[in-house]
Amino acid sequence: MAMPDPAPRRLPLRRMPATTWARQRPTWREASPARIDGALGRALARPSGNWYVLAASAEVRGDRPFGRLVAGTEVVAWRGAGGELHAAPGACPHMGAPLCRGAVDAGRLVCRWHGLALSGDGFPGWSPFPVHDDGVLAWVRLDRVGGEEPLPLPVLPERPALAPAIAAVESLAGRCEPEDVVANRLDPWHGSWFHPYSFVGLKVTEVPEGPDPDPDRMVVEVAFKVAGRWGVPVRAAFSCPEPRTVVMHIIEGEGAGSVVETHATPLGTDRYGVPRTAVIEAVVATSPRVGFALARRAAPAVRPLMRMAARRLWRDDLAYAERRYQQRTAKPAD
Ligand code: FES
Ligand SMILES: [Fe+2]
């Protein structure tokens, strides 16, 4: 007699068919550059309302300022006395000192050079930028560099409720533009080939068709590798709510409802004129599984592991994005 399915408590591991890396099914025929470029073009045409992900929410603190160049604009961020997020131009309005090297005292940003104390209300010649704290990420709106019609809030992907979830944010930077980061994510076909340490048996089961697909998403079936041939199978959908964000929603399998948001923030150009882009990736993980409730209590220990997994993938994906940038900007050979 069949036993009732104890699935929610059982480890959702699946043994994958034995295969060697070079003998997997090639995906290059389906990974059509025209298809990837079509999805990228539609993503780039969506409004961002001039919002940029600045950092993880937790990186902007009440005891010291946070500084970052965003699209060539020096931004300083800090938290006010009530914990509210502020961001403003990074140069002091007095004589231009770097405010990210200053201090935060009772919610005010204090300049290191001559002690000018600045609040979120601004100062002549120094106007704070609109900001949004979504609980996981801190956003800043830069209308001058964005050049789009401003939106009151960033275009946020759907996320699981934060209270029963674990959130982790990882950032890395590479020599490319945001579109290269987005294009990498819109090529799910590279998964098991380029990241064999993480993915097994990746299959793309749904691709957007036609000039105006609805929903505009790609669906993959893949197993996240745990050890050897053992993996955790999931179905995941990739979509772009705005031009610098790619979201992966786990729609079936372990962690259904969890999201991985990849945000690409342009930083500026280096002294050789090469653009630099930060990849800020937020994982908001959820699961009804008993083990997950325990893991959530152990969240401080789990977070670095989640970050490490992302970092390994991202080192490779950044190499892909940087290569894509080089290829598309290289001068044609004589
Ligand atoms: S430069 Fe900041 S107070 Fe003078
Ligand atoms: Fe990848």
Image (tube, rainbow, N blue to C red):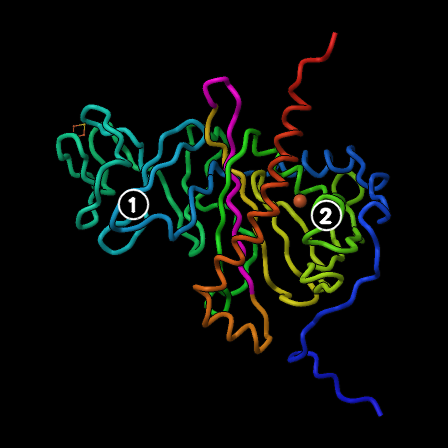
Asked whether mark 1 lies closer than 8 Å to ligand 1, one says no
For this orientation, the residue located farthest to the top is 334
Instruction: Rate crowding at label 2 as few (under 14), some (14 to 19) or many (20 or more) other CA atoms within 10 Å.
Output: many
Q: Amino acid at mark 1?
A: Trp
Q: Residue 226 occupies which quadrant of the picture?
A: bottom right
Stretch in magenta: 270-285
Residue toward you, 51 or 99 = 99
Question: Disc 1 on helix, strand or loop?
Answer: strand
Residue under label 2, please give it. Answer: 191
Q: Residue 100 occupies which quadrant of the picture?
A: top left
Give percent across and percent down for residue 185.
Answer: 66, 43
Residue toward you, 88 or 250 = 250
| Ligand 2 rendered quadrant | top right
Task: From the image, state whether disc 2 or disc 1 is nearer to you.
Answer: 2
Q: Relative to 153, is 1 on the left or the right? A: right
For this orientation, the residue located farthest to the bottom is 1
Q: Which mark is residue 78?
A: 1
Give percent across and percent down for residue 299.
Answer: 46, 66
